[in-house]
Amino acid sequence: MARLYMALIGLSLIWGMSFVFIKWLVEPAGVWGTVFLRCIAGALVLLPIFFIQRRKGEKKPLPIWKLIVVGIGNAALP
């Protein structure tokens, strides 16, 4: 049970700190600079995972339209 609570606390820190970092970043970088930096940070995290899976031999096509819908819902609309 303690492991579950630790995971919940870790997730809430990750989720909540993103708003703090956005607040700090909006002043010097502006709105569009913040959006750009968030997208670059996400790509830097996800690209190594993508290349590792490709190297393992998983040749499944990416569900591009589903990814676009999730991206719009999670990043563009808010």
Image (spheres, rainbow, N blue to C red):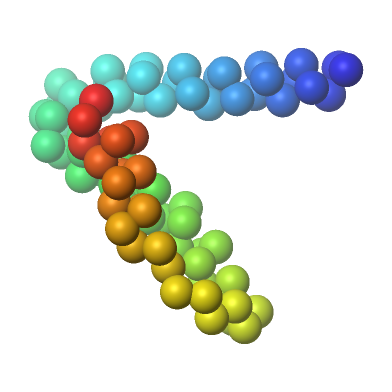
Quarter holding residue 78: top left
> Residue at (62%, 83%) from the top-left corner?
57
Single out the residue that lies furthest toward the right.
1
> Residue at (33%, 34%) from the top-left corner?
74
> Residue at (65%, 79%) from the top-left corner?
56
Is residue 61 shown left or right of residue 54?
left
x, y percent for residue 5 = 76, 16
How many marks can you see?
0
x, y percent for residue 21 = 35, 24
Depicted 9 relative to depicted 37: above or below:
above
Is residue 31 shown left or right of residue 15?
left
Is residue 46 shown left or right of residue 8?
left
Depicted 36 relative to depicted 74: above or below:
below
x, y percent for residue 61 = 45, 74
Depicted 45 relative to depicted 31: above or below:
below
Quarter holding residue 75: top left
> Residue at (42%, 68%) from the top-left corner?
62
x, y percent for residue 66 = 36, 53
Is residue 20 shown left or right of residue 51?
left
Query: Which image quarter holds the N terminus?
Result: top right
